[in-house]
Amino acid sequence: MQKKKRILLKIGSNTLTKETDNISRGKIEDLAKQMAALKDTCEFIIVSSGAIAVAKQFVKLESKSKGVFVKQALASIGQPHLIRIYQEIFREYGLLTSQCLLSYSDFEKQESKTNIVNTINVLVNNNYIPIINENDTVATDEIKFGDNDKLAALTASLLKVDLCVIATNTYGIYTKASMQEGTPITVLNVEDIEALNLQVVDSKSSHGSGGMASKIKAASVTKAAGIETWIVNGLDDNFLINALQSKVAFTKIK
């Protein structure tokens, strides 16, 4: 049997909500439809944000605590709802899903890293799609300082995936020069990443906590592991298949 291409897809809150205040079931259905179409040649691991965005649809928490603790509580409320939506929709397309909650500290211990690899390999080999998110209730880094881009890059590197795809709300990385032309940088060599930080036009989502700078940092992590990273516009329907077939513009970081 031909070895399947292992793809890690990171999808952020802004993409999952389609830039609204609610999680889009249609966008998750779009993911399921694409993965079902590609399941014979590709295997998938998803790093998904969206727990806080889901919770905000249901509750409004009042607290005298600092804002980060409210966000952690919202993540705790929203995560089961988020996974339920994934499970319901993916099941309709014959896809099985599982939940994995990770913290950055899990990547600092060899035993934890080995456990992550072994568990996810068992899931993928048995046709389950792991859906990974930051364990926000015990770790504050993702909420305060970064974004799941870093978690995606660390996971992609640990699992030695063939391709890391970051779905965002633009057609890739824009510099001031390429912005004037209205097109993203299509191919970026790894040695250009550091210089790019000085030229990049940043965009930050309304729900997420990162921006284009965090995606460039993520790419610097995957490049060290020899993994190619794509930054694609996840708002479009069929975005992954279109990128794989080179039908749309996106940034490819080699």
Image (spheres, rainbow, N blue to C red):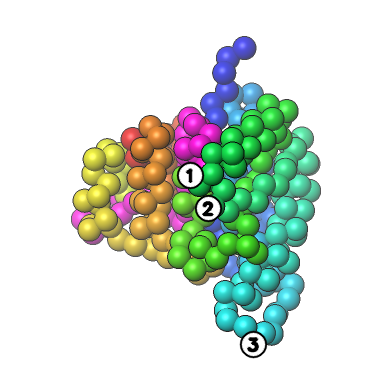
Please identify the residue farthest to the bottom as the structure is shown: 64
Residue 98, image x, y percentages: 72, 43
Kind of residue at disc 1? Leu
What SS does tag 3 mark?
Answer: loop
What SS does tag 2 mark?
Answer: helix
Q: Is residue 169 above or below residue 66?
A: above
> Along the polypeptide, which appears first: circle 2 or circle 3?
3
Kind of residue at disc 2? Tyr
Q: Residue at x 58, y 62 (%)?
A: 139
Q: Residue at x 27, y 56 (%)?
A: 197
Q: Residue at x 49, y 31 (%)?
A: 160
Distance from the alpha carbon under mark 2 to that under mark 3 = 27 Å
**Residue picked out by circle 2:** 104
> Along the polypeptide, which appears first: circle 1 or circle 3?
3
Kind of residue at disc 3? Lys
> Along the polypeptide, which appears first: circle 1 or circle 2?
2
- Find out whether the residues at labels 1 and 2 contact each other: C-beta distance under 8 Å: yes
Residue 145, image x, y percentages: 45, 65
Q: Is residue 185 above or below residue 202?
A: above
Mark 3 surroundings: few (<14), some (14-19) or many (≥20) residues within 10 A: few
Say how many tags the image has.
Answer: 3
**Residue picked out by circle 3:** 64
What SS does tag 1 mark?
Answer: helix
- Range shown magenta: 155-183
Q: Is residue 186 visible?
A: yes
